[in-house]
Image (spheres, grey):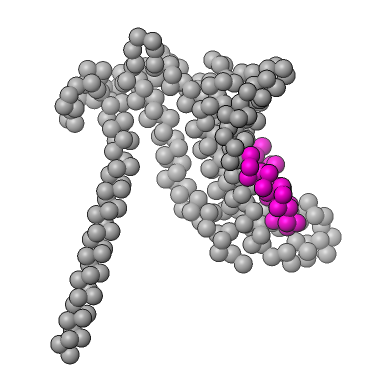
Amino acid sequence: MASVSTTRSRRRSRRILVNVLYAIAMIAVVFFMLTPFLWMVLNAFKSPLQIIKLPPELIFEPTMRNFQNVFGTQNFMRYITNSLIIGAGCTLVGLLIGLPAAYSIARFGQNRLAIVILMARMVPGITFLVPLFIIFRTLGLIDTYTSLILTHMLVGLPFIVWVMVPFFESIPRELTEAAVVDGASAVRAFVSVVLPLSGPGIVTAAILSFVFSWNNFMFSIVLASSRTRTVPVAIYNFISYAQIDWGGLMAAAVVITLPVLVLAIVTQRYVIRGLTAGAIKG
């Protein structure tokens, strides 16, 4: 009995040690990931002299001057509106094209189409930049929402397709076949039967597509100008040849990050459910 008790005690001690080490590791990872964000937020409320002061001040009198510069002098609301329009357009058009494409791949085994879409996602976006610039310049679409929505879809559309394919594969074919037998067309069966059952996946694909568009920098800096400039590109307004407005830069970064952060917090359970549901259904 003593040996059994000793064995149990050792196992319990090992379990506690493992849990403690795991907790320490998680705290270290979270600290490492959150420190740059917290530092950015602190500097957004500091004056220029406080930002460059060494050692840095952790206790200081906050100022709203940087945010007044962002929304007043730099007119950041216009850039936020541009990003919202482009992100929403990219997501909606991507869903209209990507959902039928993903369903076709899942139901009819169009592996070649899937590989082509995957290659479009894997190829660096800069590869398409010059040809797209020439095409849009010829069509007179430079500095328009249309060109930016279409280019942002190079990132969003393949992701929508590859997120939705497992969902459509997990839906029993008997459901759509029964709808066709009852007189529904293939399109109506897809809209009325398949899409409602794929709600979590559609929400996940839409959210992530919007986030990718919101954060896109490369296409926007080349194809947009003052009228359609998005928030990542607008950051350059705080960088000049002579100096860098670190306070305004940090405040603008907070403004850019905050909507995506709130969206991620609010929808995290839907995203997790959407990314895992396709793998566990059926």
102 left or right, relative to 74: right
Q: Report if residue 98 is visible in the image.
A: no
Please say if 1 is above or below 261: below
* Image location (x, y in percent) of residue 275: 53, 54
Number of residue marks: 0
Which residue is located at x 65 percent, y 30 percent?
150
* Image location (x, y in percent) of residue 74: 43, 16
158 left or right, relative to 215: right
Which residue is located at x 59 percent, y 64 percent?
281
Q: Report if residue 117 is visible in the image.
A: yes
Point out the stretch of residues depicted in magenta. 92-120
* Image location (x, y in percent) of residue 184: 81, 57
Quadrant position of the C terminus in the picture = bottom right
Please say if 236 is above or below 110: above
Quadrant position of the N terminus in the picture = bottom left
Q: Is-magenta flag for residue 199?
A: no
Overall secondary structure of the magenta stretch? helix
Which residue is located at x 26 percent, y 48 percent?
28
12 left or right, relative to 268: left
Q: Nearer the viewer, residue 73 or 209?
A: 209
Please say if 255 is above or below 228: below
174 left or right, relative to 83: right
Q: Nearer the viewer, residue 175 or 15?
A: 15
Which residue is located at x 26 percent, y 18 percent?
48
Q: Nearer the viewer, residue 131 or 258?
A: 131
Looking at the rendering, which quadrant does residue 255 occupy?
top left
* Image location (x, y in percent) of residue 201: 58, 52
Q: Residue furthest bottom?
A: 1
